Amino acid sequence: MQGRTGYMAYVADDFILYVFSLVIFGAVATVAIQPTWLLMTVFSALAYMLVFFIFKHGVKLDWSSIPLIIKESIYYPVVFYKELAPHLLILSPLYVSFALALLAEAFFAPKLGGAFWRHPFPYLAIFYVNFGVITLFRTFILFSHLRRHAFVQEFLENTTWKQAIKGIDIRFSIIHCYITGLLSHLGLLLPALAFWRFTSPTYFREAALIVFYLLLQSTYSYMKGLTENGTAIQVDSFYKWFTKNHEFQHNSRFYFTIFHGHHHDAIPSSLLASSDAGFNDGINRSLARLWFLNSVIVLLLGKQLNGNLTDIFLHQYIPGLFPYSRFVLEKRTHHAMHHYGSLRPYAAGTMPYLQYDINNGYDINNPLAQWFAETAGRYENLSPTLVANYTRPQAAYPFPSAIALSILFFP
């Protein structure tokens, strides 16, 4: 669709682009996923998303989408390199530890014979733990939403979502939101699953990766020290990268529709949450941050388990429903405004990173933020102080143990 700026929602003209986004995800899933039952489940979920798009937005064949796909696909490696290059130094403990682990394995493997350490590491079992724990929690949220679907509909009909949910049974929108979260979560892990499938990690390599990575990352964090705001430099870098990348996506039809738009097509519930990622967002982020070079345990039971669970709590923008909006107000994240139609904040929504948007015109005490805080306070019986603090400038986001966080969860 010509003339659109500040992309926040799909329209019928995006049908070809949307289908292309599903094809990309399905292709990567085919390469990465071994169990047939899981791959068939993914294809079924993608089919649901396609049907839902048609019912919600309709279909208009915008043939200009095809040259756009060709052009942007050719240029994608350049965009990807621009995302990766600035972080090669920060990512150095990751790829250096991987190289050291391979060298150690090559040196010691002949001496180990048929020992336990040379056996394949069960990365799929660890994946099932990660995906299972988060999916179980997400499913509990799904049933709590379905049980109170009438409330969900009534609430959203009095918000900027009124037109978006019109004419569709709200239960289908809730299920769509749930599937969005599942696929977005999976997208974050697909590159690693594909990498492990074809590189066959062993117990020795896994142990060596953990030792080398923790040693190098802790040394790097100590040598670089902390940033001025007290946040670990790796955390600071991640959020700055996220903000710039997020702004770029919302100002590009191709990148919004193909990579990120799924995250905004679902109702503003924690069901959709997975590290602020759309389907192909997750794939791209995993590649650009070299997550596939991590140890299986560090990535799946450290970085991704923590990141996804936290993101679920930080995306509950329908107050009064589990897991509730209290956590959003306590952490003063203004990302809620973004899901209610405001382009800004592009940042994760918390101070000090919110300062980027404030410097570019975002008013932390805007009417939408006031409405959200007051509504959450009323539905969840929150203290007036907590509600009032939401729209007041605050100190830096209170990260726990900055060095430990940088080792276990970032980049």
Image (cartoon, rainbow, N blue to C red):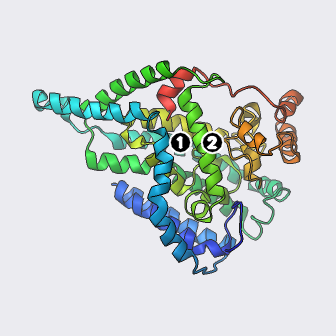
Looking at numbered disc 2 in the image, what kind of residue is underneath it?
A: Ile
What residue sits right under mark 1 in the picture?
134
Q: Whole-Å distance between the Cαs marked 2 and 1?
A: 9 Å
Mark 2 secondary-structure assignment: helix
Question: Mark 1: which amino acid?
Answer: Ile
Name the front one of labels 2 and 1.
Answer: 2
Residue 160 lies, with reference to residue 133, above or below; the image says below
Question: In the figure, is residue 35 to the left or right of 144?
Answer: left
Q: Residue 312, which numbered label?
A: 2
Res 266 label = none
The tally of labels here is: 2
Q: How busy is the neighbourhood of tag 2: few (under 14 within 10 Å), some, or many (20 plus)? A: many
**x and y, in percent, of residue 258 in the image:** 55, 63
Q: Are marks 2 and 1 in contact (CB under 8 Å)?
A: yes
Q: Secondary structure at mark 1?
A: helix
Query: Which residue is painted at 57% across and 20% down in the image?
Result: 401
Image location of residue 176, percent across then percent down = 62, 60
x and y percentages locating residue 364 in the rendered image: 82, 39
Q: Is residue 348 above or below residue 406?
A: below
- Could you tell which of marks 2 and 1 lies nearer the N-terminus? 1
Residue count near mark 1 (Cα–Cα under 10 Å), binned few <14, some 14–19, many ≥20: many
- Asked which quadrant contains residue 211, the reply is top left
Percent from the top left, x then y, of residue 279? 53, 56
User: Can residue 338 be seen here?
Assistant: yes
Q: Is residue 148 visible?
A: no
Task: Tell me the quarter of the image containing the N terminus.
Answer: bottom right
Residue drawn at point x = 63 percent, y = 22 percent: 230
Nearer to us in this view, 187 or 312: 187
Which residue is drawn at the image coordinates 61% and 25% (left, top)? Answer: 231
24 on left or right of 155: left
